[in-house]
């Protein structure tokens, strides 16, 4: 992917594989509450790598982790408003000016 695409990402995620990030965000968005184990089965990324990526996405406020109502031992991943907005933005093929505005913090991403 191009460096323009990466400019729209939080700094901690800019070195990550864009296809992997888009895939993770899309699956979590569609599932609206998926455990890390189920997500790992869908994306075929080893557990260690997935855990590190998810930590970065949570710290960047793109994903949220909450306890499952029925089984408190299970943590469910959900997309935040920022995560949904970033996913829609990246899927739309943003222009260079859009990315520059986003990187400067002059634009709020809407879900």
Image (spheres, rainbow, N blue to C red):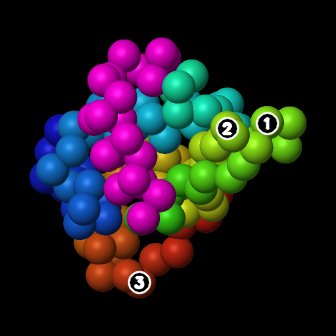
CA gap, disc 3 and disc 2: 37 Å
Mainly helix, strand or loop, the magenta region?
A: helix
Q: Position of residue 49 (x, y in %)?
A: 27, 35
State the mark number for residue 74: 2
Answer with mark 3 or mark 2, whichever residue precedes in sequence: 2
Question: 48 or 25: which is nearer to us?
Answer: 48
Foreground: disc 3 or disc 2: 2
- Image point 49% across, 47% down: which residue? 87
Can you say whether 39 is above or below 49 in the image? above
Residue 93 seen in the figure = no
| 10 Å crowding of disc 3: few (<14), some (14-19), many (20+) | few
* Residues tagged 1 and 2 counted as in contact (Cβ below 8 A): yes
Quadrant housing the N terminus: top left
| 10 Å crowding of disc 1: few (<14), some (14-19), many (20+) | few
Secondary structure state at the residue bearing disc 1: loop
Residue 48 sits in quarter: top left
State the mark number for residue 71: 1
Residue that protrudes farthest toward the front in the picture: 73
Q: Which residue is mark 3?
A: 106
Secondary structure state at the residue bearing disc 3: loop
Part of the protein shown in magenta: 40-59
């Amino acid at each position: 992917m191009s460096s323009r695409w990466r400019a729209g990402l939080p700094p901690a995620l800019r070195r990550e594989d864009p296809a992997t990030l888009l895939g993770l965000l899309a699956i979590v968005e569609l599932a609206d509450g998926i455990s890390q184990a189920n997500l790992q089965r869908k994306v075929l990324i080893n557990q260690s790598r997935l855990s590190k990526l998810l930590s970065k996405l949570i710290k960047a406020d793109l994903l949220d982790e909450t306890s499952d109502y029925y089984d408190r031992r299970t943590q469910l991943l959900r997309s935040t408003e920022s995560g949904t907005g970033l996913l829609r933005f990246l899927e739309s093929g943003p222009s260079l000016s859009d990315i520059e505005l986003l990187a400067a913090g002059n634009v709020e991403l809407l879900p």
